[in-house]
Amino acid sequence: MKRFARKLELAILPTPIQPSGRLSVLLGSDNVVLKRDDLTGMALSGNKVRKLEYCAADAVARGSDILITCGGPQSNHARATAAVAAKLGMGCHLVLNGTPEALPEGNLFLDLLFGARTTFVSLPDLRDQAKSMEEIADAYRTEGHRPYVIPLGASDALGSLGYIDAIGEIADQVEKVGIIPDRIVFACGSGGTLSGIVAGCLVHGLNCRVTAISVAFPSQWFDEKVDEVFSGLREKYIPELPDPRGRFEVIDSYIGEGYGKASPELINFISDAASLEAVLLDPTYTGKALFGLMKEIENGGIDKDEKVLFIHTGGVFGLFPYRQALLDAFNKT
Ligand SMILES: Cc1ncc(COP(=O)(O)O)c(C=O)c1O
């Protein structure tokens, strides 16, 4: 497969494509398959390791010794970055927007286990974390370190190369079995995975609809984000990349009460998916996205005869902070 930049081999690839099994009962369709990117390895890093293979390669090439990134206290991306730093023998410093938990759990617990340092900030807009990261990077430089700053979600042109590769991988897999999906569906947060998937379909000639389920921002936000990543891709790696407009849709009607907020219906759905097919979904990303797919099939937005490839992007550790809500759901039945 053509490579547009150097990358480290950190993930276990290709990840399998599996039938959805008994989840088809929940989803109301026998035509959904799961691309198991929750099984990319690297301490269950999910979609993030594909992006970080590129960011970490760049960091290593520049002689960096500390990875700095940001997110919420339960950020999967921050935890995956901490895991990659540990694997590479580098330091890691995470800027986390929120308050420290008295007893760190889920992703935050793993950040600490992987040896990452944390700085908690309280910012109304996640994007303001860039400034905090730069201040921390400057402090490390003063001490003689060579820090490398990875943007929110590694959702820039470099990180998105990971999902261009993922689409190449999917194209190979589906061609072998002769079943080309009509549509790819997945969770989108900071837009890097979406940008990579849209670009990947163009680069690898995979002709299917791309439907992202937003867990945070309104759909217009992603139009700008994809444009921005595409500009970076054209400038640095793929000058001939066509226009992304009209090549994807973002559905923003399943955000619910907000990022990381789970309705009782979503909690029940996650609990059903686990007990029916042993598929672990998290309330922030994959649960919302698969729930959204189910609802779209139910309301006819997606035809139940369409062949859908759902990318399971990981995030299992984000399940643990919702223990109480899930246990309450079991008690009700
Ligand atoms: C489990 C999981 N799925 C999907 C996403 C969305 O990826 P992106 O931020 O590239 O839109 C994330 C991002 O943090 C994630 O952690």
Image (cartoon, grey):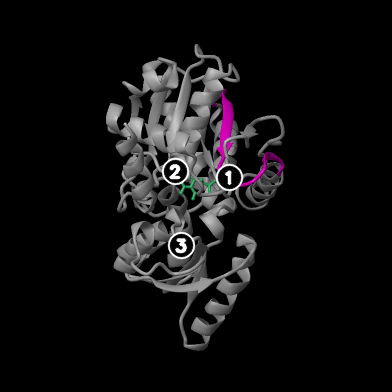
Foreground residue, 27 or 193? 27
Q: Residue at x 59, y 42 (%)?
A: 195
Callout 2: helix, strand or loop? loop
Which circle's residue, 3 or 2, is located before the other in the chain?
3
At label 1, counting other C-alpha atoms closer than 10 Å, the crowd grade (few under 14, some 14-19, many 20 or more) is few
Residue extending furthest bottom? 143
Foreground residue, 10 or 280? 280
Q: What percent of the width, then of the height, locates residue 102?
A: 37, 70
Which circle's residue, 1 or 3, is located before the other in the chain?
3
Which image quadrant is residue 219 in? top right
Single out the mark in the foreground, 2 or 1.
1
Identify the residue position indicated by label 3 in the image. Answer: 73
Which circle's residue, 2 or 1, is located before the other in the chain?
1
Magenta segment boundaries in residue numbering: 206-220
Reply above or below: 151 against 174.
below
Within the magenta stretch, is there residue 268? no
Q: Is residue 247 visible?
A: yes
Q: What percent of the width, then of the height, locates residue 87?
A: 31, 62
